[in-house]
Amino acid sequence: MTTNTAGSSDVDIARALSRRLSGLGSGPGSIATGSQPYLRFTSPAAPVAPSGEPGGTRIDEPLNDFTRWDEFLAWSLNTVRSSAAFAVDPQGFVIGSSGNVPEDGFEGTGAELSYVMSQADVMNPEMGSLRSIALEFANRRLSGFRSEVPGGEGFVLAFIDAEGFNKTTQEQIARQLEHSFSVLL
């Protein structure tokens, strides 16, 4: 097995490794070819039909059997009606993305979001661990939440301009991640 280690201060090596892990090629805008390429959507996700619950998602909805991150993220993207979604592993690397993904991906955003969430945990330990975050910028909205998976690791799932990002959809996505996690890795 090959060892891919990089110092935490070498951003270029970390970015290249992250792009390789998420299925993107090493050059800007290039996509690695393989049997399981990531899906890229150019238009915003179709809205979910209302079901009486806020956000249009029922908690008792049956769980899907996802085997790839791109499938899971595409489903998540549609669940929260977002223009893009990405997943960040506990080390701060983006491991998958879906939707309107910028040419340079979400590596920098994912690492910074993961860092911000970990720093928020130490601001006031009595409040407990930060579960979700929503950042409003002049032109965009970034929402994300941390989902604990079997083994106690926290993965961050983030969404750009999510219309249906709420507690109900977070719980549904977290349930689905927990259900599919063992085969997603």
Image (cartoon, helix red, strand yellow):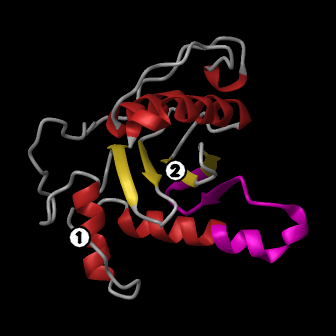
Residue at left 32%, top 80%? Answer: 6
**Label 1: few (<14), some or many (≥20) within 10 Å?**
some
Q: Position of residue 38 (x, y in %)?
A: 24, 41
Q: Secondary structure at mark 1?
A: helix
Residue corresponding to mark 2:
158
Quarter-of-image position of residue 44: top left
Q: Which residues are magenta?
A: 118-144
Q: Which numbered circle lies on residue 16?
A: 1
Quadrant holding the C terminus: top left
Q: Secondary structure at mark 2?
A: strand
Q: Is 121 a magenta residue?
A: yes
Residue 86 shows in the view:
yes
Residue at left 11%, top 56%? Answer: 30
* Alpha carbons under labels 1 and 2: distance apart: 21 Å
Residue at left 71%, top 12%? Answer: 52
Q: Is residue 139 above or below residue 12?
A: above
Q: Residue lying at the far right in this picture: please name it.
A: 126
Q: Position of residue 152 (x, y in %)?
A: 64, 51
Q: Residue lying at the far left in this picture: please name it.
A: 33
Q: Is residue 177 above or below residue 147?
A: above
**Label 2: few (<14), some or many (≥20) within 10 Å?**
many
Q: Amino acid at mark 2?
A: Ala
Q: Residue lying at the far bottom in this picture: please name it.
A: 9
Residue 103 shows in the view:
no
Quadrant holding the N terminus: bottom left
Residue at left 70%, top 30%? Answer: 168
